[in-house]
Structure formats: structure tokens, C-alpha cells
């Protein structure tokens, strides 16, 4: 899928597979693009639980772009 090249801070995503304890299908937004080619995602579709960190670092190929912010 070519959408991984379009991912940027503010893009809304869905996990294509489980990552760091978060299930496939979890949704959130990109909060940072890291130098190593990974992105930092804040998962917003998960319940607040002390045992689950809602911020994960993910390679773009494990993400599906659901919406993208427009440049201002």
C-alpha cells in the first residue's frame, strides 16, 4: 500500500497488526515521525488502562492510513 509514504504528523491511522500489546484495528493519530523511519502513535480507541501504554512506536508498514490532515 502506497499510503505509508503519505503518513505525517496529524494523520489518523489504524494498526494493521498487533503492536506492543495494542490489538490490530486500534486507531489513533501520528504524533511524531522519528529518524529511524518509525512513527510515534497515540492510540485513542483503547480504554484508559494503567497497564497499557497508549503511545507506541510503529514502522509505517504496520499502519493503515484512515485520514490525513490538510496543510494549513
Image: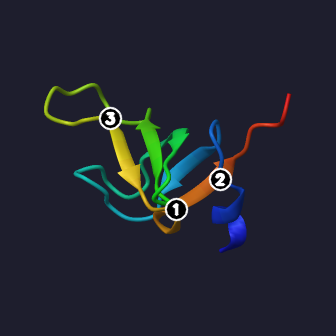
The x, y position of residue 52, in whole percent, is 21, 36
**Residue found at the far bottom of this picture:** 1
* Residue nearer the viewer, 15 or 60: 60
Label placed on residue 7: 2
In percent of the image, x 65 and y 74: which residue is there? Answer: 1
* Residue nearer the viewer, 9 or 11: 9
**Tag 1, which secondary structure?**
helix
Label placed on residue 60: 1
The residue at which mark 3 appears reads as 54
**Residue found at the far right of this picture:** 72
User: Badge 1: few (under 14), some or many (20 or more) residues near its Cα, within 10 Å?
Assistant: many
**Residue found at the far front of this picture:** 35
C-alpha separation, residue under disc 1 versus residue under disc 3? 17 Å
C-alpha separation, residue under disc 3 versus residue under disc 2? 19 Å
In percent of the image, x 31 and y 54: which residue is there? Answer: 23
* Residue nearer the viewer, 2 or 67: 2
The x, y position of residue 44, in whole percent, is 44, 32
Q: Is residue 68 above or below residue 36?
A: above
Foreground label between 1 and 3 = 1
Q: Is residue 8 left or right of residue 32?
A: right
Looking at marks 3 and 2 on the same chain, the residue that comes earlier in the sequence is marked by: 2
C-alpha separation, residue under disc 2 versus residue under disc 1? 8 Å
Q: Is residue 35 above or below residue 17?
A: above
In percent of the image, x 35 and y 35: which residue is there? Answer: 46
* Residue nearer the viewer, 48 or 6: 6
Amino acid at each position: 500500500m502506497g499510503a505509508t509514504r503519505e503518513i505525517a504528523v496529524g494523520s489518523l491511522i489504524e494498526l494493521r497488526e498487533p503492536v506492543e500489546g495494542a490489538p490490530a484495528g486500534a486507531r489513533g493519530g501520528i504524533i511524531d515521525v522519528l529518524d529511524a523511519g518509525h512513527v510515534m502513535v497515540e492510540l485513542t480507541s483503547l480504554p484508559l488502562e494503567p497497564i497499557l501504554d497508549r503511545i507506541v512506536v510503529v514502522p509505517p508498514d504496520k499502519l493503515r492510513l484512515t485520514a490525513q490532515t490538510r496543510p494549513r
